[in-house]
Image: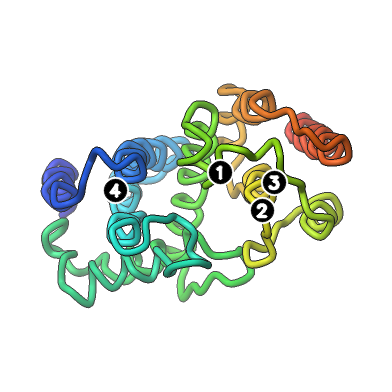
C-alpha cells in the first residue's frame, strides 16, 4: 500500500537535517514537491489506475533525494563535477535502508529504484527490465522536465545555471551543432553555463507524452526562459535565436 501523506512527512523529516537557507536546498525542496504533483498529473492524464498514479507521485517525491547530500558535500548540482545524484539517491534509499521510511511494502522497490536511476540518464543509457519500469521511468522524466523548465522561468541564474553572467559567455559550436542536427545535448560535452542553458532547451525533444508538451506550451516556459537572456556576443545571440526558433517550430508540429 502506498501512503502518500506518510511519504511526504518522511521527506519533510529527511530534508530537515539540511540547511533550508541554502538556495540550492530551498530550490530542491520546492522542486520535489512540484514534480510529485506533475507526475500525478501525467499519470492521471494517461488514464493509469490509482495504484500507478500513487506510485508515480511517490517516485516524484523520491527522485531527487540524492540532491540534498550532493549539495552538502559539493555545493553543486553538476553531476560531472561531483557525483551522480540519481545513484546517490538510490544508495541513500536502498543501501542505507531509508526507503522503508517512505513506503513499507517492498513490492515496488525495483520500479522505484529503476525510475530514480533513469530519470536523469540520456535516453539511450536507460536500463529497463519490464514495462512497469519503462512506464514510471518515462513519467518521472517528463514530470522532472516540466518543473525544471518552470523553475528556470523565475529562479535566479546563479542557482539555476551556476553563473550570474551567462550573457557574457558563448555557446560552444559542438553543443550548438548537436542541438540543431541531432536534437540532443550530451551533458559531458557542455563547457559553459550557456551550454547548460542549451541543454535545457533540448528537453523539448525528450518528452514521452504529449501531455507534458502541452503543459510547457501553456506555461510558455521556453518563451519566458528565452526572454531572460541577451548575449553580448553577436554570434552567440544568433545561435540562441535559432535554438529558440527550432523549439517553437517543434512544439507547433506536436
In the picture of the structure, the residue carrying the numbered disc 1 is 163
Q: How is the image coloured?
A: rainbow
Mark-to-mark CA distance, 1 and 3: 14 Å
- Say which residue label 2 marks: 192
Q: CA distance from mark 3 to mark 4?
A: 27 Å
What residue appears at the point 77 percent right and 56 percent down from the top-left corner?
175
| On screen, residue 217 above or below 167 | above
Judge the density around disc 1: few (<14), some (14-19), many (≥20) Cα neighbours within 10 Å. some
SS at mark 1?
A: loop
Which residue is labeled 3 in the image?
Answer: 198
Residue 112 picture location, percent across and down: 32, 63
Q: Is residue 222 visible?
A: yes
Screen quadrant of the C terminus? top right
Mark 1–mark 2 Cα distance, whole angstroms, equals: 9 Å
Badge 2: few (under 14), some or many (20 or more) residues near its Cα, within 10 Å? Answer: some
Report the front residue among 95 and 194.
Answer: 194
Q: CA distance from mark 2 to mark 4?
A: 30 Å
Amino acid at each position: 500500500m502506498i501512503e502518500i501523506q506518510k511519504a511526504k512527512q518522511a521527506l519533510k523529516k529527511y530534508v530537515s537535517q539540511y540547511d533550508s537557507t541554502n538556495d540550492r536546498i530551498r530550490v530542491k525542496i520546492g522542486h520535489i514537491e512540484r514534480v510529485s504533483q506533475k507526475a500525478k498529473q501525467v499519470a492521471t492524464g494517461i488514464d493509469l489506475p490509482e495504484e500507478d498514479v500513487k506510485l508515480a507521485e511517490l517516485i516524484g517525491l523520491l527522485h531527487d533525494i540524492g540532491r540534498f547530500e550532493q549539495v552538502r558535500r559539493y555545493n553543486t548540482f553538476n553531476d560531472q563535477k561531483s557525483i551522480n545524484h540519481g545513484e546517490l539517491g538510490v544508495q541513500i534509499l536502498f543501501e542505507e535502508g531509508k526507503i522503508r521510511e517512505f513506503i513499507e511494502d517492498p513490492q515496488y522497490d525495483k520500479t522505484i529504484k529503476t525510475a530514480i536511476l533513469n530519470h536523469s540518464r540520456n535516453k539511450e543509457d536507460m536500463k529497463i527490465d519490464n514495462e512497469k519500469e519503462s512506464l514510471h521511468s518515462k513519467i518521472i522524466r517528463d514530470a522532472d522536465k516540466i518543473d525544471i523548465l518552470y523553475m528556470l522561468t523565475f529562479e535566479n541564474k546563479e542557482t539555476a545555471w551556476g553563473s550570474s553572467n551567462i550573457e557574457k559567455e558563448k555557446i560552444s559550436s559542438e553543443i550548438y551543432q548537436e542541438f540543431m542536427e541531432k536534437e540532443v545535448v550530451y551533458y559531458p560535452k557542455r563547457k559553459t553555463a550557456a551550454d547548460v542553458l542549451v541543454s535545457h532547451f533540448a528537453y523539448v525533444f525528450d518528452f514521452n507524452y504529449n501531455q507534458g508538451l502541452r503543459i510547457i506550451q501553456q506555461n510558455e516556459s521556453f518563451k519566458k526562459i528565452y526572454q531572460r537572456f541577451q548575449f553580448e556576443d553577436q554570434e552567440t545571440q544568433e545561435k540562441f535565436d535559432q535554438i529558440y526558433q527550432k523549439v517553437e517550430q517543434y512544439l507547433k508540429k506536436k
